[in-house]
Image: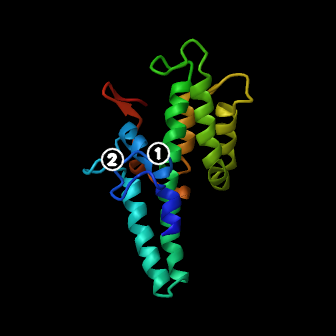
Amino acid sequence: DEGWAFYAGSLTGEDGASNGKLLWELANKRCADFGTCGDDGKATANTKALLYANLGRDKILAAECDSARDELNIIVQQMTIPVVQGMLKYAFKADSANGEGSCSDGDCPKEWAEGWAFAAAVLPQIDACDSTVAATIVSNLDVANSAPMTDGFAALKTAVESTYTCLGISCGDVGAFQSTAGIYT
């Protein structure tokens, strides 16, 4: 229960419908951006994380602690999804070669910083999967660089997608960044 409280936070309410500040809310925001909301409007990643948190809790209460590790691993995978989505959203927006982003004039410090914040959160996991991909992320999103997204969004996205299997997630889990205008590639 305490672990779930750190995921959902106290502001989401009992039904998860209120605006919170932690991963639950982030996943619900990003699911709308990436087409990964369930029929109930909540992020599929949240629904799965809650399911496995409850299963893990039940195993722990039944003194099956060793087997609860499986649920923990699935929860970590689900927690990774909105962070990857956030990184991709702001990488897209920070790409100056992208006319549909926010950086067409080369001045997008907010988008660049947000991309780097999400990247920094998931970078250790990606580095454990593929250090070359981690280096690509750093060279494109680190705010210490002279400019963001020098390799372009498509190259970064392709590199990140190559780590999905290792991260325990899929393209379907992450979805595709989109708006009412369509899907951005």
**Of the residues shown, which amino acid type is indicated by label 1?**
Leu
Relative to 123, say whether 147 is above or below: above
Label 2 SS: loop
Q: Nearer the viewer, residue 33 or 183?
A: 33
Q: Residue at x 74, y 30 (%)?
A: 144
Tell me the tag on residue 37.
Answer: 2
Quarter of the figure with residue 50: bottom left
Where in the figure is residue 130, as x and y percent of width and height? 65, 51
Q: Would residue 17 be found to the left or right of residue 57 on screen?
A: left
**Of the residues shown, which amino acid type is indicated by label 2?**
Cys
Q: Residue at x 54, y 14 (%)?
A: 104
Q: Would residue 102 be found to the left or right of residue 140 on screen?
A: left
Label 1 SS: helix
* Crowdedness near tag 2: few (<14), some (14–19) or many (≥20) residues, C-alpha within 10 Å: many
Where in the figure is residue 165, as x and y percent of width and height? 51, 56
Quarter of the figure with residue 117: top right
Tell me the tag on residue 26.
Answer: 1
Q: How far apart are the alpha carbons under marks 2 and 1?
A: 12 Å
